Amino acid sequence: MKRYLNRLGICALVGGLSLSVAFAAGGKSLFPNMAKVSDDTNNKKDTTETAIPESSIVDEVIWVVGDAPILKSDVEMARMQGQTEGVVWNGDPDCLIPEQLAVQKLFLHQAELDSIEVSESEIASGVERQIDDWIQAIGSREKLEEYRNQSLTQIREGMHDEYKNMLLTQKMKSKLAEDIKVSPADVRNYFRELPEDSIPFVPTEVEVEIIERSPVIKPEEINRIKDQLRSFTERVTNGETTFATLARLYSEDPGTARRGGELDYVGRGLLDPAFATVAFNLTDPKKISKIVESEFGYHIIQLVDKRGDKVKVRHILLKPKVSQDEIDKSLSQLDSISDDIRNGKFTFEDGATFISDDKDTRNNRGLMSNLTEDGATSRFQMKDLPTEVARVVDTMKVGEISKPFTLTKSNGKTSCAIVKLKSRVEGHRATITEDFQVMKHVVMAKMRQKALHDWVVDKIKHTYVRMNDRYKDCKYEYQGWVR
């Protein structure tokens, strides 16, 4: 279960008591109110317990696992996130979510004891993959930023700790289950006893090769963008206007434009490398950087503040526009390339190696790679392909080369492509002979799930757990929470 760090209020844990912030009628804030305040140490006097309506509590500690608190706001944020992602809770989310958060804390605590670590590069690459998936699903970088009401940089920063905890949990689970082995006999025995209607259905899977050509941006368009950015710098330097005003009016980064181009404190690893180099070298808030080219376009940057290894800046982003005639030229080139391939002048794979502009597939002879929990594979379910590619591949026959088409990359740039359908395996019920690896994964997952379940139950026995009374009547997946 993901850990959500957004906090709605202030809560402290002192002597095992939950200290909640409550608000009086009329919106006036009361002094942080302990539900029960007493001086039992000297038994001087008793106090009267003040009942506080739960609806008035901004935040409170509802569980404690070891020395780690779980806040009411953690549960609410998880519930909201689940709703936006269409999660269907198999039970009462008020019970399930705290338990899932508690289980994650058990794994994180064990990961700390076992010195499990994840690198910043692992976190950054994982965050990028997730963002790419969202961009593919929603249609464009701009739509994602509008939907989240955040810039990509803010999305990256907000996902950092959450993704780090997820990776630590995954690595800890992998370590706990690393000795589990599955033999062919285990697979045969498991599926021999499985009812026919329970045999896994394997969705249609395809392997796709791709050749991409990036439309050339005309020099005069780049010069136009740079001239405009230089004019912005001059207007700010002359005192004619402010950097923030120009960012609101002209920046093509919608997530930051509405805030005057401002990025909140962010670490170097979460920024485009070229952007980060310039941003972290700025020292004078009154000066504006030189023009910076990143994968997203061209920027000018103004320092706001530095704090440790993080920087707070404003920026203005302008994106050169690809002309339709350059797009048409790239599509025409791909049309000629596909004709040469069909005529036997060279293979699709050779074309991908020596002609394609896509660095991710060029060194793999054009074969697209799908990153899954089990590692990289060349097989994709249709839902895992980029939208434009899936739409083209859907009606293709094996060995066929598509007509040229356009697609939008994760950085928002336009690319042109042709694809070849290398293989297709239609959806079917799994069989031992054709899908042994699929069935092996199922058996492995069952054995792994049981081993981890048993570990959690045992870990609970040796971990301090406290929860509010209202959670003690819940039905939990793991035994031992309620003491």
Image (cartoon, rainbow, N blue to C red):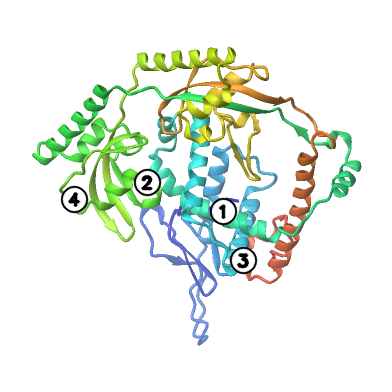
Ranked by sequence position, the earlier of labels 1 and 2 is 1
Query: Which label was assigned to residue 285?
Result: 4
SS at mark 4 in the image:
loop
In the image, residue 54 lies at what x, y percent? 53, 55
Whether label 4 touches label 2, CB < 8 Å: no
Q: CA distance from mark 3 to mark 1?
A: 13 Å
Query: Which label was assigned to residue 271?
Result: 2
Q: Residue at x 50, y 75 (%)?
A: 47
In the image, residue 101 lies at what x, y percent? 60, 56
Mark 1 — residue? 167
Mark 3 — residue? 110
Q: CA distance from mark 4 to mark 2?
A: 19 Å
Question: In the rendered view of the protein, which quadrant contains the C terminus?
Answer: bottom right
Q: Residue at x 50, y 17 (%)?
A: 405
Is any atom of residue 261 visible in this view?
Answer: yes
In front: mark 4 or mark 2? 2
In the rendered image, which quarter is residue 69 located in? bottom right
Horizontal side of 34 relative to 203 (left or right) equals left
Is any atom of residue 4 visible in this view?
Answer: no
Badge 3 amino acid: Gln
In the image, residue 469 lies at what x, y percent? 63, 63
Q: CA distance from mark 1 to mark 2?
A: 20 Å
In the image, residue 331 lies at what x, y percent? 45, 15
